[in-house]
Amino acid sequence: MAIGLENIKPEIPRITTIGRLLKESKIRRIIRDIMIGMGFQEVITYMLSSKSVMEDKSLLEKREFVELINPVSSEYEVLRDCLLPKLLQFLSYNIHEPYPQKIFEYGDVVYVENGIAKVSTHLAAAISDYKVSYEDIQAVVVALFKALSKNISFKPYNKLPFIEGRAAEIILDGKSIGIVGEISPRVLVNFGLEFPVGIFECDINKFIF
């Protein structure tokens, strides 16, 4: 049964309420402020992407994606399950901008686990410059988690899209929560990037929520 919006009279609530931010919003603001304080610029990329970007160009392993049935374009055929390829794509669009380029994104990803689509929140950051090494991006990770009062360690990680011996898993309380490393020259060529790139990505849900 409908009564019409024009017949609904506004009423002032009889109780007093105090608005406050959700825990997720507070954490996002804290992390955002830390990253900006370290000289990074926040970017926002599309949730939709292509298998070419997510797998072929980035040389990440083949995996199952949440796919659109009738995508408008092959560029928007799947939902991203990580942020790393999207940051590399963003850098490829800005190769004519001044260096160093320091960017980060805090956003949701969608992955498939046991045939079920799940959502998680990730943080990723990248540095591109004439001379960038694993140590440069690792220092950012150390500073970030120190500011968050979290004690982390690193475990060698020898898989693409990173240079062998120049990457590591980020370990917190015995669990892997992310990866950090120097991007392989093969991947740089795939994205048309002329300078080295250091990048990290971590799953916020694994250590905050």
Image (cartoon, rainbow, N blue to C red):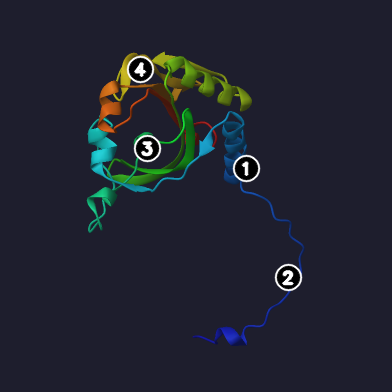
Q: How many residues crowd around disc 3 within 10 Å: few (fewer than 14), some, or many (20 or more)?
A: many
CA distance for labels 2 and 4: 56 Å
Front position among marks 2 and 4: 4
- Mark positioned earlier in the residue sequence (4 or 3): 3
Q: Position of residue 126 (x, y in %)?
A: 44, 29
Image marks 4 and 1: residues in contact by CB distance under 8 Å: no
The amino acid sitting under disc 4 is Tyr
Q: How many residues crowd around disc 2 within 10 Å: few (fewer than 14), some, or many (20 or more)?
A: few
Residue shown at 29% from the left, 40% from the top: 114
Which residue is labeled 1 in the image? 26
Which residue is labeled 3 in the image? 82
- Mark positioned earlier in the residue sequence (2 or 1): 2
- On screen, residue 96 versus residue 37, left or right, reads left
The amino acid sitting under disc 1 is Lys
The amino acid sitting under disc 2 is Pro
Q: How many residues crowd around disc 4 within 10 Å: few (fewer than 14), some, or many (20 or more)?
A: some
From the viewer's perspective, is residue 64 above or below residue 188?
Answer: below
Which residue is labeled 4 in the image? 157
- Give the quarter of the image for residue 185: top left
> Which residue is nearer to you in this view: 123 or 40?
40
Quadrant where the C terminus is found in the figure: top right
SS assignment at label 2? loop
Residue shown at 36% from the left, 34% from the top: 88
Which residue is labeled 2 in the image? 13
